[in-house]
């Protein structure tokens, strides 16, 4: 009897929870929409209703709503209320996959908040605290969406302190005439700002001026030198690096000089001089990197014994290093050590492509893959994988979970990302890691068209999802389907190329603004600040990206793989790759381990889309 009572109690409570109307969310969204439409009095009315009638609302407890409330009062000129609410507008999330991890995207939110709060504090007479918030807007990484607020903040600060006037003129006017009056810390920030803005000549000039500073601190000197060399590499001035390392090499960190000299020779494909330079890197933070590149060169030479000797000296190995070791054992026919290393990779990186690849090899040890190149090997694995997938049954998700999915999906349909994040974090689906919970969160996020978060969540369950035919698609989804199909027909570009480009370039993040100044789903370069908003639009972005793919297909005579590589990684990399007569390529000949790893993932992505959907 007690058991029956408990079941009835649970069902009644579940039903009550799932039938909640979420009026507070509706009112908040109405207020937010009014704010974006510049209807500030209407926004104020909605937000006051929210504060007075729904003080228990999760969006107030989470502090999310306070940003829009504070900004509404700021726009209306009510500085005191703007300060009160903007100071509260600090919120974070429990789930790591909700945080995209991009410094640029974080700064987009905080830039306007910090500037508005600092300005409002000054206008209420609290100048000291206001200046603290304005000083936060000194970013070392350029973003066209935050630089407007940075410039305004520095302009206000310059009225208080002449040193900020000099710094402002350097950073935004390119005026180098007063750099001796600017601190080294600020000069280093400004130099990196120029670097991230692709103004390499300004960055190079400023780093060289910093290095002329008398009695410069050792740490600042090393940072300026390494950043100068990095700038020259990005600007493809490899010969200048060799000249400068010889000049600076008389004094200072010899490991740094030998590393960058080796890297310059590496970029010039002078591998004998490159290896000599890397061999002279004896310790410090550059030693592991030098060993990593050396191992990559030996691997491309087919000298697998040297690969093993070199990687054995690397103290902290990443997945790329582990793969080189496993593949070297495989090439040498050392089955015992290969199996041990492969099992370690499967356990350590369960959701990686490599884990799947090695699982296949261990189960099919009679297959000799050494005689085949990349596309064939990938196709072999995928065919085997898809042939052995299971189907999910009707009881995969229980009734109570289905009800909660339905409830959360209705909130996701409101299309407010922060609201659904709050609800998911308070749901039963985050209590444990299970394939059912992974499926639930992905489908809920899809309902709100939060596609990048849905994909990110699915990626954390890749190994589990790959056991089921119905779930593999979440690792290779068909998001933005209508736009992709329409542009595929318009430009006569295969859909698998468009989807592969989107997944590799942005992982379906339509708001991605990368540090190499590219925008949105297909990472389109922008030419002006005004163009950015347009490029964030998925339909516009996909149309422009597909048009570029069409042009590349014409250039490479319909070769899909070459066109995809050229689009994602550039034609310079494509020209360094050796292709077979049948269009396949031998990744073993790629000297850069990171490039080899990226190219392998690109091929896997393309082949999955091709085989899963039969476009």
Image: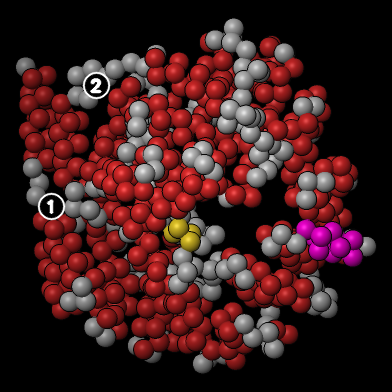
The region drawn magenta spans 238-247
Q: Quadrant of the N terminus?
A: top left
Residue 95 in percent (x, y) is at 38, 44
The image quadrant that residue 447 belongs to is: top left
- Residue at image mark 1: 22
Whole-number angstrom distance, CA of label 2 to CA of label 1: 29 Å
As rendered, which of 5 and 609 lies closer to the eye? 609
Judged by depth in the image, the label closer to the viewer, 2 or 1, is 2
Q: Residue at x 58, y 50 (%)?
A: 570
Q: Please say whether residue 517 is visible from this viewpoint.
A: yes
Q: Quadrant of the C terminus?
A: top left
- The dot on residue 396 is 2
Q: Residue at x 54, y 89 (%)?
A: 158
Q: Is residue 27 above or below residue 546?
A: below
Q: Is residue 14 above or below residue 520?
A: above
Q: Residue at x 11, y 63 (%)?
A: 53
The image quadrant that residue 18 belongs to is: top left
């Amino acid at each position: 009897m007690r058991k029956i009572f408990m079941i009835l109690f649970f069902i009644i409570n579940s039903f009550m929870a799932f039938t909640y109307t979420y009026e507070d969310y509706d009112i908040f969204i109405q207020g937010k929409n009014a704010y974006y439409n510049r209807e500030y009095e209407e926004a104020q009315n909605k937000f006051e209703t929210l504060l007075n009638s729904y003080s228990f609302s999760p969006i107030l407890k989470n502090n999310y709503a306070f940003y829009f409330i504070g900004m509404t009062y700021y726009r209306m000129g009510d500085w005191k209320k703007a300060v009160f609410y903007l100071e509260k507008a600090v919120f974070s999330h429990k789930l790591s996959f909700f945080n995209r991890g991009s410094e640029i995207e974080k700064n987009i939110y905080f830039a306007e908040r910090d500037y508005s709060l600092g300005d409002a504090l000054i206008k209420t007479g609290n100048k000291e605290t206001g200046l603290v918030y304005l000083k936060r807007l000194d970013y070392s990484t350029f973003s066209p969406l935050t630089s407007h607020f940075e410039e305004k903040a520095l302009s206000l600060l310059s009225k208080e302190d002449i040193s900020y006037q000099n710094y402002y003129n350097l950073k935004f006017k390119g005026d180098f005439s007063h750099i001796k009056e600017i601190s080294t810390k600020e000069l280093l920030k400004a130099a990196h700002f120029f670097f991230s803005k692709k103004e390499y000549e300004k960055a190079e000039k400023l780093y060289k001026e910093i290095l002329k500073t008398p009695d410069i601190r050792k740490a600042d000197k090393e940072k300026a030198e390494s950043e100068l060399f990095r700038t020259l590499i990005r600007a493809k001035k490899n010969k200048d690096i060799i000249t400068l390392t010889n000049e600076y090499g008389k004094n200072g960190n010899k490991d740094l000089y030998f590393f960058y000299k080796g890297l310059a020779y590496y970029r010039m494909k002078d591998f004998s001089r490159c290896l000599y330079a890397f061999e002279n890197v004896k310790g410090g933070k550059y030693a592991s990197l030098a060993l990593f590149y050396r191992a990559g060169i030996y691997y491309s030479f087919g000298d697998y014994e040297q690969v093993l000797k070199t990687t054995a000296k690397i103290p902290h190995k990443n997945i790329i290093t582990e793969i080189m070791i496993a593949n070297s054992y495989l090439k040498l026919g050392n089955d015992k050590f290969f199996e041990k290393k492969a099992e370690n990779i499967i356990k350590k990186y369960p959701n990686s492509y490599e884990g799947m690849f090695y699982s296949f090899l261990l189960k099919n040890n009679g297959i000799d893959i050494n005689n085949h190149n990349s596309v064939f090997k990938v196709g072999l694995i995928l065919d085997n994988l898809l042939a052995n997938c299971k189907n999910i049954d009707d009881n995969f998700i229980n009734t109570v979970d289905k009800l909660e999915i339905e409830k959360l999906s209705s909130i996701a349909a409101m299309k407010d990302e922060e609201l659904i994040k709050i609800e998911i974090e308070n749901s039963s689906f985050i209590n444990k890691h299970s394939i059912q919970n992974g499926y639930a969160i992905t489908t809920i996020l899809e309902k709100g068209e939060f596609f990048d978060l849905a994909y990110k969540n699915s990626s954390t369950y890749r190994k589990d999802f790959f056991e089921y035919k119905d779930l593999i698609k979440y690792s290779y989804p068909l998001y933005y389907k209508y736009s992709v199909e329409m542009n595929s027909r318009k430009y006569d570009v295969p859909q698998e190329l468009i989807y592969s480009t989107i997944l590799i370039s942005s992982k379906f993040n339509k708001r991605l603004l990368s540090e190499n100044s590219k925008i949105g789903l297909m990472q389109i370069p922008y030419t002006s600040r005004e163009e950015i908003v347009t490029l964030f639009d998925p339909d516009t972005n996909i149309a422009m990206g597909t048009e570029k793919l069409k042009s590349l297909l014409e250039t490479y005579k319909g070769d899909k793989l070459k066109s995809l590589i050229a689009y994602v990684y550039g034609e310079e990399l494509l020209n360094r790759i050796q292709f077979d007569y049948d269009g396949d390529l031998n990744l073993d000949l790629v000297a850069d381990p990171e490039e080899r790893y990226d190219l392998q993932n690109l091929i896997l992505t393309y082949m999955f889309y091709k085989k899963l959907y039969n476009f």
